[in-house]
Amino acid sequence: MALPDEIEHFLDAAPESGEMTTAAALALRLYGDPVEIGLIHADRDPRTVQERAAAVDAGAVYSSKRRLAICMRLEVLAISLARGRGDLERAGFYELARRSIEASVQMYATFLANSHVDDEVYGGCLRPFKRRPRVQGDRPTRPALARIKSPRIVRETVKRDREIAHMRAIWRLWDDFPAPTDQAEVGAQHVLAIAERARLEEAARRAATREAYMDRYRSTQAAIRHRDVGLQRQFPLLDMNGPNPRFKRRSRAYQRAAKRAQRAVIKRSLRVAMCVIGEDATRDLVAGRSIELPAGDFSLVLRAPRPSARGHGAVSIRLVDLQGLPLASVCVYQSAPAFDQVASIALYAGAGRAMDIIETGNLFQIEPTAVDHPAIAAKVRARSEITIQAGRLRHDRIDLDPLFREIKPMVIEIVETFVLGRRRHGCQVSFV
């Protein structure tokens, strides 16, 4: 009997993340009781936002501990199922479990080595960010380098890691599994062949079910098309050729009405602009030319490349000094049409509040003359300090890949020793 799709997805994802062994997933698929597996799997965290919100309101608390506990219960069930098989299958399950644990150890050790290097220099992986990077020139400081290369620090990190402790507990279960070691490779191939045969049988069964589903789908689509043809004959102006004709039917009359409404908005904004900046300035903007609005110690040069545009970028704003030398450009976000934006900027400038535009907007394309200009010097200096600080942080982000490659073998050896045990692995690292 096949497992439900949700449980199949769980058994696919758990071995990939090192939470279960591949052998356990195969044993559950081949010999597991769907009802018993479903009862264990039902204790998982809620998957949807609505389910999680309802559970939290009811007082439930969820964490990764619950998922690891579910994986451990499924692993114990799979081992009990595998114990009842023949010698060849037991040897195969044990070999697949060993391979899966070793692959998970390599994956976690690689991640742990990378995060250990970053945490000692910058933080932000398994520990909080450091207030100051431990960097001196183009390399980590001497104390940080000593901690990175210290096996004692790595062992402490490994012992605190919950996922690595979970893998160690799983291997302790398989370490006492009764399996003949001389048939490991043949047994693994035998188990994989059984699993592949079961997969093909399930695929054939689902193909018949899928064909019946597709028959129902095609009949439903035929009924929809028949109804749409009837609607087309009854209402000839309906557009039935869109990507979703049931919800996107637009008549020619509707399209003409939408264009008229758009033109009405443009005409209204043009009338407002003519009342504020005058007819000649409005004509210049419509023709693609720029206009200049005095604003005390500087002027605002406005240009509207597309009169029909609206929103961000519809109006170009350039700051120039009293001699006409460019200072900077200003980006101000508005969702209004272009000429409504022009009218609002002109009203601000006429009221003597042009500095509000500069304070609200973002300066870019800053010219050297802007640094000493009295009106915008403070804004330019603040932006320059932010840019310099960002550049300094980028400069401090040194290349840590060589150091990561140097300590990776040591971290892998320590994690393997902790998970697989010194007796099997043959390492000399102690976790006492």
Image: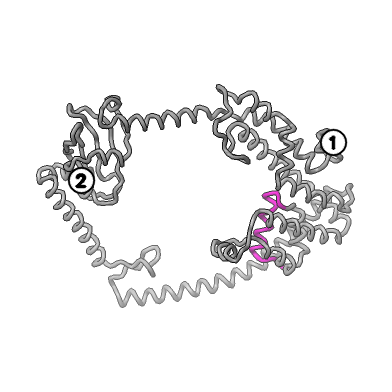
Q: Nearer the viewer, residue 132 or 9?
A: 132
Q: Residue at x 32, y 33 (%)?
A: 379
For the residue labelled by badge 2, is the local secondary structure a helix, a strand or a loop?
helix
The residue segment tinted magenta is 1-19
Mark 1 lies on residue? 426
Q: Nearer the viewer, residue 380 or 138?
A: 380
Give the residue type that dot 1 points to. Answer: Gly
Q: Position of residue 195 (x, y in %)?
A: 75, 58
**Relative to 349, residue 176 above or below:** below
Q: Position of residue 402 (x, y in %)?
A: 63, 27
The disc at residue 341 is none
**Relative to 79, residue 127 above or below:** above
- N-terminal of the pair, mark 2 or mark 1, is 2
Quadrant in the picture for the N terminus: bottom right
Q: Position of residue 71 (x, y in %)?
A: 72, 56
Residue 100 visible in the snapshot: no
Which quadrant of the structure image shows residue 385?
top left
Label 2 Cα neighbours within 10 Å, binned few <14 / some 14-19 / many ≥20: many
Mark 2 lies on residue? 342
